Amino acid sequence: MTTLTLVQGDITRESADAIVNAANSSLLGGGGVDGAIHRRGGPAILEECRGLRAGHLGKGLPTGEAVATTAGDLDARWVIHTVGPVWSAEQDRSDLLASCYRSCLRVADELGARTVAVPAISTGVYSWPMEDAARIAVETVRATPNAVAEVRFVLFDARAYAAFASRLACSRT
Ligand code: ADP
């Protein structure tokens, strides 16, 4: 049974088996969580990402999918990179956001990761409304069978933390 926990803070300071990165499909770095992970994790992560791009991910990582690399200097064994959808008012991309969480859990299972730290995917540059993102994140992790002991949502600010906390409380049965 997976325990869902919440902390407010910088995900690059967390200690976990795997840390999830809200990457972009290039896998070659960006802003937000992505920039922070590459900065603190050091060049080994980017080097492995480049290797993936030179190999089976030549066109980049598709939205909703996930892939693991080393965690470099982070206090983790792996970074699991996933690409969230850009929020759209015209098109319902909820299943792609849910797919990010499902894909990360599947990769975590394949790796044997027992603790996984996860940011609020798509809620930064990709503009997904926080309350809805929290609903999708919590519902999807709860509904996805997996062997991860702890999924720790790491929320950068008080607003994100509050959105996840209220969603966690209301989905508890
Ligand atoms: P996306 O492109 O998927 O929207 P971002 O990295 O821009 O990804 O933002 C995702 C969420 O992560 C946002 O809520 C943002 O505030 C948060 N965030 C940014 N930096 C960090 C960090 N170092 N640790 C945890 N969360 C972070």
Image (spheres, rainbow, N blue to C red):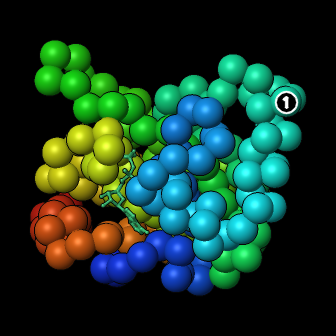
Q: Image check: 164 left or right of 105? A: left
Q: Residues within 10 Å of mark 1 (few under 14, many from 20)?
A: few
Q: Image check: 123 left or right of 146? A: left
Q: Residue at x 85, y 30 (%)?
A: 54
Q: Residue at x 59, y 47 (%)?
A: 29
Above or below, comparing residue 28 to residue 171 in the picture: above
Above or below, comparing residue 170 to residue 149 in the picture: above
Q: Residue at x 32, y 39 (%)?
A: 126
> x, y percentage for residue 162?
15, 71
> x, y percentage for residue 105?
57, 52
Above or below, comparing residue 146 to residue 129 in the picture: below
Above or below, comparing residue 150 to residue 123 in the picture: below
Is residue 88 at all visible to an observer of this figure?
yes
Secondary structure, mark 1, is helix
> x, y percentage for residue 170?
13, 64
Figure quadrant, ligand 1: bottom left
Q: In terms of image quadrants, where is residue 57?
A: top right
* Foreground of the two, 19 or 144: 19
> x, y percentage for residue 71?
72, 67
Q: Which residue is mark 1?
A: 54
Q: In terms of image quadrants, where is residue 43?
A: bottom right
Q: Residue at x 24, y 55 (%)?
A: 134
Considering the image in quadrants, where does the C terminus appear?
bottom left
